[in-house]
Each structure stands twice: as C-alpha cells, then as structure tokens.
Amino acid sequence: MQTVGEACRAVLLAADPPLKIRTARAVARAWRRGDLRHDFDATMPDQPARPASPELLPPNRMPKRGGGSERGRIALLHALAHIEFSAIDLAFDVAGRFGAQFPRSFVDDWLSVGADEAMHFAILDRRLRVLGSGYGALPAHVGLWDSAAATAHDAAARLAVVPMVLEARGLDVTPDTVTRFRIAGDEPSARILHRIYTDEIRHVGFGAKWFGFLCAAGDIAPAPHWQMLVRRYFRGVVKPPFNDSARARAGLTREFYAPLAAD
C-alpha cells in the first residue's frame, strides 16, 4: 500500500475482525508517519467484506437486549461491538471515498476516527470474552451499511447522516446505558461505554466540522441544508430525548435537529 486510497480500501476488504483491527491500526500509523501518499487512486468497494459470523438479521428479527441480566448485558455489548466494527469501515470509507474533495486534515481526522473505532471494537470484544461470549456469538443488525450506501455519491449527505445523525444518537442514549450497567454492578462494562462516549463526541464534531466546511465553500446555510439531506437520505426518525450538551460540544446545535424532531 503506497497511497491512502489503497490503504483505506485494504481496511474495507479485511473480513476477519482481528485482521481488520490490525489493518486499521497499521494504516492510521502509516498515515501519521507520512508513509502514505495523499492520493485517492483506489475505488472503495460498494460493500465491505464481512466475516462468516455474526448472522445478519433485519431489525424485526433481532433479539431483545437490555442492561439488567447478564444475558441482556451480553446482548447489548454484542450489538455495540457490531456497531463499532461497522464504524471502522465507515471511517475509512469516508476518508478513501471523499478525501480528494477536502484538505489533507480531513484524512487526519477520519483515519484517527477509524483507529478509535478499531480500539472500541477490540475492548468490547475482549469484555464479551470475559463474560463467556464474543463477537459473532449472537445475530447482528443487517442495516448498518444502508446509510453509507445511500450517500456514497455525496460527501455532504454522508457527513449529515452518518456522524451527525447515527453517531449523534449514541450521544443521546449512552449515558443512560452506562447508568444501567452500573446499577447492575457491571462497572468494567460501564467504564468501556463511557470511554467510547467521550470519543464519539469528537467523532460527531468531525462530522459537523467538515459538513460546515462544505457549506461554507458553497455559500450554503448549514442547518437547513442538513435538514434537507437528512429528510432525503435517512430512513429513520430524528427523535428526542437529545443530549443537548454533548451535541453542542460537538458543534451540533439545536438549530440543526430540533426542526426535524418537530416533524
């Protein structure tokens, strides 16, 4: 791998979870060292490679999960591990697919996100193994790549939907999840989730930063443009309760999402 485009593609094509983690970390290190050219000569795949397990199911067939019983906590940790595994691909895809449209620091940001997501997945999988499970032991959500596929043609749409809707939702729900794990006496898992939460504020911030960059370049009002893109490309609902303080720390203020919540 000589270019950052080739390196991002290599991460997306790594199916085995340990290989994907190693590749993601190696690419992030190589980029920081200056070993990869700022060149986007490789095409990103339409779909990332996936391991044989977990079985991927539609939302209505997913088992219920919660933070009370150990079985429920394992199911929730597994679902979160799958989100983080998918987030590795999302970070490297946005860098490799859209990096040529942005300054070099765009790649700096998203490869650092990809390295974070690889770390998040690794510590969640390790926690699952301590609890007698592991990634792949349970079914997982089939639709996490849908938003990436829907926005593969448009950098602004990708930034609007993935970090600024999907990751921002994590900021809303994770504090309560941490509390539930602590009430259940699972402090190790609670600490892991809190660590992920603090990293995700920065990730949402990168989305807001680069979305703002595109809007400034096009002399476009950011909040109405974001609302238009979310209505067009996001299949879900932007709904409260919102963690306004964490969202604001990321640069995602209520002027963006409050009008959608009122729809």
Image (spheres, helix red, strand yellow):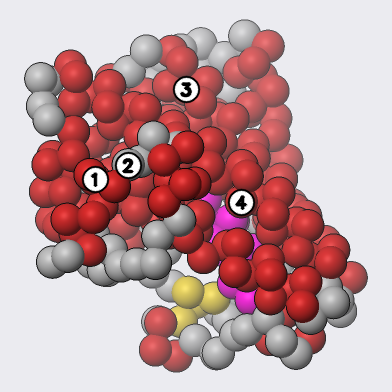
Q: Position of residue 26 (x, y in %)?
A: 70, 30
- Report crowding for label 4: few under 14, some 14 to 19, many 20 or more residues within 10 A (C-alpha): many
Residue 107 bears which disc, if any? 3
* Label located before the other in sequence (3 or 2): 3
Tell me if residue 153 comes above or below residue 232 in the rendering. above
- Left or right: residue 48 versus residue 262 is right
Say if residue 63 shows up in the picture.
yes
Front position in the image: 230 or 240? 240
User: Is 178 colored magenta in this rendering?
Assistant: no
* Label located before the other in sequence (4 or 2): 4
Front position in the image: 97 or 181? 181
Residues rendered magenta in the picture: 76-87
- Left or right: residue 166 versus residue 127 is left
Q: Position of residue 59 (x, y in %)?
A: 40, 82
Query: What is the spatial separation of the Cα atoms under label 3 and label 1, in whole angstroms?
Result: 25 Å
Q: Amino acid at mark 1?
A: Phe
- Report crowding for label 3: few under 14, some 14 to 19, many 20 or more residues within 10 A (C-alpha): many
- Contact between marks 2 and 1 (CB within 8 A): the answer is yes
Q: Which residue is mark 4?
A: 197
Q: Amino acid at mark 2?
A: Thr
* Label located before the other in sequence (3 or 4): 3
Query: What is the spatial separation of the Cα atoms under label 3 and label 4, in whole angstroms?
Result: 22 Å
